Every structure is written in structure tokens, then in C-alpha cells.
Amino acid sequence: MSIEWNSDTREFHLRNDRISYIFRVLESGWLGHLHFGPSLAAGKAYAHLVPGEFFGYSNRLGEPVPFECPTGGSGDYRIPALAVELADGSGVLNLRYRSHRIVAGKPPIPGLPSTYTEVGGEAETLEILLVDSVADLEVRLLYTIYRDRPVIVRSARVTNASKGPLIVRAAMSASIDLPDADWQLITLNGDWARERHIDRRDLRPGRQSVSSVRGASSSQHNPFVALVRPAATEETGEVMGFSLVYSGNFLAEAELEPFGTTRVRMGINPDGFSWVLEPSASFDTPEAILVYSATGLDEMSHAYHSLFRERLARGAWRDKLRPILINNWEATYFDFDEARLLEIAAAGRELGIELFVLDDGWFGQRDDDTTSLGDWKVNRRKLPGGLESLARKVEALGMRFGLWIEPEMMSRASALFEAHADWAVGIPSRPLTEHRNQYVLDMSRPEVVDYLFGVLSGVLGSAPISYVKWDMNRTITEPFTPTMPAWRQGEFLHRYILGVYALYDRLTRAFPGILFESCAGGGARFDPGLLAYAPQAWTSDNTDAIDRLKIQYGTSLAYPLSSMGAHVSAVPNHQGGRVTPLATRAAVAFFGDLGYELDPTKLSEDERAAIAEQVAFYKQWRELVQFGRFHRLRSPFEGDGNETAWMVVAGDRKAALAGFYEVLNRVNIGPRRLRLRGLDPATLYRVSAWPPSAAPDQSSRLIGGDLLMAAGLVIEARRMAFPVGDFLARLYVLEAVDSEPGGAE
Ligand code: DGJ
């Protein structure tokens, strides 16, 4: 890994064995992009990659010169990376290279979550200072390259060195110009209960984007996009990923311009955003993580998974095995008391479950969703001994205790609202929009963050609490804060999310032993920003195994299995009413952080035995699942979507777990093959099926890794003893065997 500066050609070259990122200082002093892609030789000049010279204002207007930090108004009519309103109301900038420095490691970004380094020599960071000497505006572009990852991390800091205020209208974390437009755009889209479905479309002339204006990254779009060559697959072709470490309003946009080049920009959504920079003040953007893969989506996803797991997630739980939990939400909703909860916990414990999570309804007068958010005092009618008594009794059963909170919210019917109605986000002269009977607290106010830290520290310190589910059940309307003057209201939504991060930061530091799981009415804030504090997230409120195939498959494009809360729930499913086999529900939930979202006291003998067996199975394989390498094998978004398959392989390739799922049964079809990936071709694997009754034809066969990858596992529906029907799943466990007994294939 190196960051080279060639002072003759004025080129920067960030490289490791897998990627190169190259740009240079143009004659005008602007930064011109040259290459992002496969690793290129060090010590060479690449300026000729971009034909012609660029002389700033004398360039022919509108020509697609590739820039690193494009601004508008001086002949580049594409989407800008930075827009600043100057004292005279104009917005034209002339940002010229002034200096640079290269530092070991990776500096943090004040107030924002970011990736980090842990060992020396792991990464280097280039900081470039650009200056507009008319406006006295300084822009620092930061680029980090890791030694062993195909990743470039970018962010920017804008500083007002002038004597009057300036207004930042747009500040992207990254902008990149690519020399052609032969790309397709992949985005993750949906809504509540159908989050992160994959869409793949051709790039068309003009702009195409996904974004959020909801105050949260949202379930409608995710702050991740990829550009892929039209022929790219999981295993082949060029892919570029773009991910934003941010939980608020974001924008990811691609522009195909008339000369056939592509610009991609990513950052805080400029829609509704502005930031007043007083003299000497700086504004830091969140960071964007760019990944390049020459070998398809699989490699890109692996780069994100390992980076997020190893160098974004923080704290004691980063490297620990995640507990199997049982959550009382779908078992009781708001209707419980201590005895009922302990019945559920005890029944869960008998099944081998390790953590009992008390969900919504334990505080204030909360018997339904109309009341009490903000009143974080235990409801003594339901829990006469308080949280402490319940938690201690749960611990006495041999389980850990976890708790649900929704810090950012306030019900109208609450003591908090009576005392602090002005803490609700809203415009004083207009009605407040209620959603789920609740308002959002103004997290941009430091006193609100302080108050919540005080109250929640009290709650978390009052009992042996090992896990917290931090929910957020509505997005923001009437964005406004009375604490800021009129001309600074464009700062509100970013300040809101900075407040959320501040609270997360303080609580996770104060309670380092607690495992935090983020949640937002399911997966409406499943983003890298929150993964920095909460290493796992509730993937979706929709626990239907068939719907989960698409949700978990789409989520896996950017996020590791260790970040996905995945639960087995009762049937008919509470969200969609579908009835699926218990084994299928488990076979989907095994590919994540396993939990149960049902009433274990209502199970039949057979179901109890089956769940105990699932729990034991997951315990045996969870290290592989949570820390192995994931591969997508068959997409529910392609063809008729009837089949999905994926697998996870241990780091040493001595074990693997593959899942094959079929939505609707098809009668009298021939044998199919499922080609596996990531195995050691020279290793012999013992292949057994789960549950053992599912595919006896496959049980304890010995098959070479080469054959499993080249030809695949044969899935013979007709020979299966498994009851024929819809919504079936088969898992295959692969274990390396040392020597070759007879009968190997
Ligand atoms: C939404 C969450 O996603 C659910 O799991 C549950 O915690 C409810 N909120 C509780 O109100």
C-alpha cells in the first residue's frame, strides 16, 4: 500500500495490490480524476489517461473534464460536489490545489461515525488542501486507502477563512468521474416490511438518483448504490460500490452526460439542507466508502462486510458471538406482566435460548401505542418489582436480559410532553403531524440529548441489562427547531442526526458491555452510520420467511450477516398471514443473528423439539455464520424468483453452510444443480442435509470442493423424503474431511 506524490507530473496515486486511485493537479490548479480501478504500477505517470489539458475557464464550456471536487457556474454543468453561497450571493468557486500531507492511519471525523484503523501500517490518509482565494474558502479532501482492502474512503472538510459568514448549500462526501457510461445502476429500495429490494437498471442520459428526505436513511432507499457493467454477475465483471456512513437524509446520484461519461456523487442530501459557516468554522461531511471489484458483486460485498464488521463496528461486541434471543413483542404485544414474561423466558431457556428481550410496553402507562413514550419509568402495575426484579429472575433462569427503548420519541399523552411540549420537532405556528400517535424529540438540542442520556443511563444502570433494542418508529415532519435562527433552519436535520450519534456515543461508552441493536420500525435505519455504534440491526418487521429471502438477500449486498437480526416467528405470520414450515423459517433466520419472536409456551411438543434442535444447530454453526464469508448463489430478484440460494464459508474453508429455498413447489421437474463458491477445490467435504429428514439422498456424501464448485450439489426434488409442498428450504452442511475414505465423488 502506498500513497505516491509525483511532483513532476503532480499526480497522486493511492494503491495497494488490488486497486489504484489516481488523480492530479491540473494546470489550472484544480484536481482532475484519472483512474479508479485495478491496481496499476507504482512510479509511473498516468496523466495521458485523460486526453487534452484543462485550463479552467478557457476550457470549451461543458466538456466532460473529470474532476475530484467539481463546483458549478464555471463551465462544468454536471452535478456538483460542492455548492457554497458567498457573501455577495454568488456561488462560483475556483478551488485550487495549495498543499497536501500524507498521514499514517485514518483520522476520525468530529461528531460522525467513521471507519478506523487498529494496527500500524493498516492504512494511510491523504489530505489535500484546496483554496478559493477570492472567497477565502478552504476545502480539505480526505482519502484513505487500506493495505488489504479494495476500498477508498473519502470525506471533505469545508472551512470558512473569510471574515463573514458563508452558506454551504451542498457538500458531497465523494464525487467521481468515470470515462464511460457502460454501467447499470443497482439500488436498494422498498418500504416498511419490504426493505432493501434490489433494483438494477441501465444508466440513461441525465440524472438518476436515490435519496431520503425523511430525516432517517429510510426503508424506501438505502445509502448504498453500485455501478456494474451490464454483463457483471456475482463472480465476474467490474463493479463499483458507493456507501455512505450516515443515518440521515442522503443522496446518491449518477449523471450520464452527452459525451458519454458518468459522474457519481454521494453525500448529505442537498434538498432541504444548508449550513451557515461563520468565520473560522468548518463543516465535516460524513464519509463515503468506495469499493472496486473486477470480479463481480460477490467481491464488492465481501469488501463491505469485512470493513463494516472489522473497522466500522466498535466495542466489545464487535468480535463476540451474538446471543440467540427471544423477544416478547409478537408473543404479547403490550399485554404482559412479570409472571407472563417469566413464563416466556423460562420456556425459551428450556429451548436453549440465551437472551430474553422485553420489547415495547414496560414503561409509563403504555398499554397501547397511544401513550407514554418519553416516560422511561417502569410500569409497576405490570412489573411490580421493577426491571431489576425481572432482570434478576431472568438471569436466575440462566439467561441474559435485554430491553427495548425508543429514545428519540415522545407521546402527546406523556409526562414528558406536559413538561416539555417544546421539545417536539415542529413549527410553532402549524399543527404537528402525529404518526403512530407520537412526536419526534428535537435531538439537535444538546439539552434533549443530555436529558435522555441522564434518564436512560438511570434505566440501563438500574438492572442487569445486557442488550438494548433502540427503536425509532416514525420519520420527521415539519422539520424546524426554535433554537436556531431563520437562516439556519437548513441545518436542522443534520444536527438532529448528530444529536442521535452523540447519544449513541455516550450510551455505548457508558455501558460498554451492552450489545446494542438498532431498529427503526424494522429496517428504516439499516445503514453504516448506526452500525458504528450498534453492530446489529433489526432487518425488518416482516418475519415471513419467504418475504425475508428478498429482504436479507438485498441487505447482503452491503451489510454482513452479523449485522442482520433474523427471527423465527409464529404462523400465520403476523405481517402477511402466510403459513410456512417451521424448518423453513429457521433455515432463513439462520443466515443472520438468530432470534425467536413467538410465544414458546404455546408450542406443541414437536415444535418445541424442533426449535431446541434449531437452537443447538445454530450454536454449532454461528461462528461460521456470523464471521464467515457470505456468497449469494441464486437471486430471488432474477427470473421468476422462485429459487433463492446462498452460503457462508469459514475463513479456513474447512466448513460451510448452504441454503436453498424454493417458494412454490413445481411438480415433476428434473434434478437441479446448485454450484457452490468459496470452497477449497483440493478439499473433500462431507455434505449433510439439515434438517436431516430434508434430503436423505444427500446425507453424508463425500464430495470434492472442485466438483461442488464446478458442477454443484444435485438437488433432487423428487427423491426427497421431505413432505412435498410450497415454501421449502434445504440446508447443506459441508465439513472438510482429512483423508479420502472410499466413496468420494
Ligand atoms: C417496531 C419494531 O420494529 C418492532 O419490532 C417492535 O419493537 C415495535 N416497534 C414496538 O413498538
Image: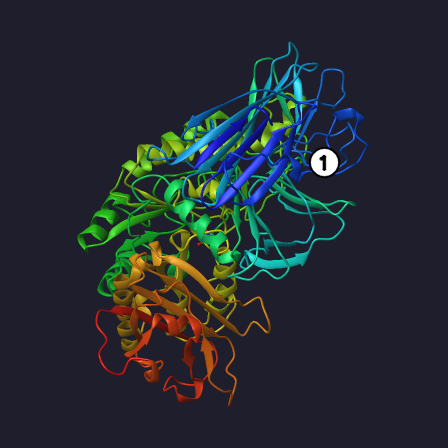
Judge by depth and name the residue closer to the eye, 564 or 383: 564
The quarter of the displayed image where residue 178 is located: top right
Residue 165 visible to an observer of this rendering: yes
* Residue 532 spot, x, y in % from top left: 42, 40
Left or right placement of residue 88 versus residue 716 in this view: right
The residue type indicated by label 1 comes to Val
Quarter holding the N terminus is top left
* Residue 693 spot, x, y in % from top left: 32, 81
**Residue, disc 1:** 65
565 over 23 or under it: above or below: below
Judge by depth and name the residue closer to the eye, 592 or 358: 592
Q: Residue at x 50, y 75 (%)?
A: 663
Left or right placement of residue 370 versus residue 178 in this view: left
Element at label 1:
loop
417 over 722 or under it: above or below: above
255 over 285 or under it: above or below: below
- Ligand 1 within 8 Å of the CB at mark 1: no
Left or right placement of residue 388 versus residue 563 in this view: left
307 over 595 or under it: above or below: above
Quarter holding the C terminus is bottom left
Q: How many marks?
A: 1
* Residue 475 spot, x, y in % from top left: 57, 44
Residue 517 visible to an observer of this rendering: no
> Badge 1: how crowded within 10 Å, few (<14), some, or many (20+)?
many
The quarter of the displayed image where residue 229 is located: bottom right
* Residue 44 spot, x, y in % from top left: 55, 35
Judge by depth and name the residue closer to the eye, 383 or 537: 537
Please say which color scheme the image uses.
rainbow
Looking at this view, name the residue that lies furthest to the right. Answer: 60
Left or right placement of residue 547 versus residue 512 in this view: right
